[in-house]
Every structure is written in C-alpha cells, then in structure tokens.
Amino acid sequence: MFTAKSNEDIITFSFGKSVAGYLDDISVYDFSISEELMKDGNFESGTLKNYCVCVSKDSTCERIQSDQYSGSYACKINSWGLVELSQGLKTIVGRSYNVSFWYKSQDGAYEDLYVFTSAQKTVN
C-alpha cells in the first residue's frame, strides 16, 4: 500500500546484484474507484513500452514466454549490476493505493528486490 505524494507518482522495481528471476502481475489498484492504474502489469502487450527500463552493463530485462504467474508472458530479470523497471501513474494526492506483484527467483535464492514510489510532478 502507498499513499500518493503528487498527481503523477512513479512506481519502481529495483533489482540488485546477482538477481535472476521473473516478475509478473504487477498491480496498483485504486479501491475507491475500482480502477487498475498499471498499464500492462501482466506483460501481455508484446513489449515493455509502458515501462522505463534502466539496466547496467551485463544486465537484462526482457519480456519472455515462460515462468509466468498467469497469462502467457512475464518479465525476466538478469542482473549483475542494477536493473530498474518504472512506470508513471496518474494518482490523487493523499489517496492510498494497493500494490501487489508476483516474483519468482530463478534459483530459489534470496535476492535484492526493492519496490518504491516517488513523486513525478509537484502539486500546484
């Protein structure tokens, strides 16, 4: 759960060193109006165009057709440095949103996965 800090917040999934796994079914849900804010949270669109993807050298973030939680696709993360997957959201200042996602480690080990939100645009 997070509370919006602006009218346009950003949700970021950040993966640390030595991460290999699969991300799927990302949801940022507004229960007050029964609306999903994430675009292509299940990675079914065919690309990662709804996301800002930042990867360090020798790291990858790609949409694949295996090890998904539901549907046909997931996002595969291979990080030997840093991988960040972000998306801007239209939010209302002070409103709370429910955040959920599915993640599966490729080898079952503990990995560095952080989820955070930040304000994209200041409130007037």
Image (cartoon, helix red, strand yellow):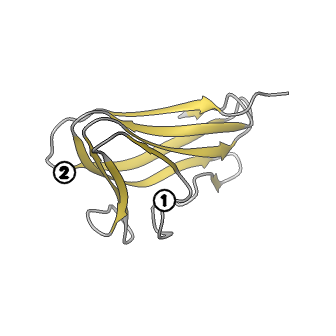
Q: Which label was assigned to residue 48?
A: 1
Q: Work out whether mark 1 precedes mark 2 in sequence or the reverse, and give the earlier one.
A: 1
Q: Which mark is residue 8?
A: none
The structure residue drawn at horizontal position 31% and vertical position 63%, both measured from the top left corner, is 68
In the rendered structure, which amino acid carries the disc numbered 1?
Answer: Leu
Q: Is mark 1 in CB contact (under 8 Å) with mark 2? A: no
Q: Determine the image quadrant of residue 15.
A: top left
The three-letter code of the residue at mark 2 reads Gln
- Residue at image position (51%, 69%) is 45
Q: Residue at x 24, y 39 (%)?
A: 80
Question: Relative to residue 21, is residue 7 drawn left or right?
Answer: right
Residue 96 spot, x, y in % from top left: 63, 35
Q: Is residue 28 above or below residue 69?
A: above
Q: In the image, 26: left or right of 91?
A: left
Residue under label 2:
106
Residue at the extreme right of the image, as rendered: 124
Question: Could you classify mark 1 by the number of other residues whose Cα lies within 10 Å: few (under 14), some (14-19), or many (20 or more)?
Answer: some
Is 44 in front, or is 98?
44
**Mark 2 secondary-structure assignment:** loop
Q: How far from the left and from the top, in percent, is residue 4?
A: 66, 32
Q: Position of residue 77 (x, y in %)?
A: 31, 49
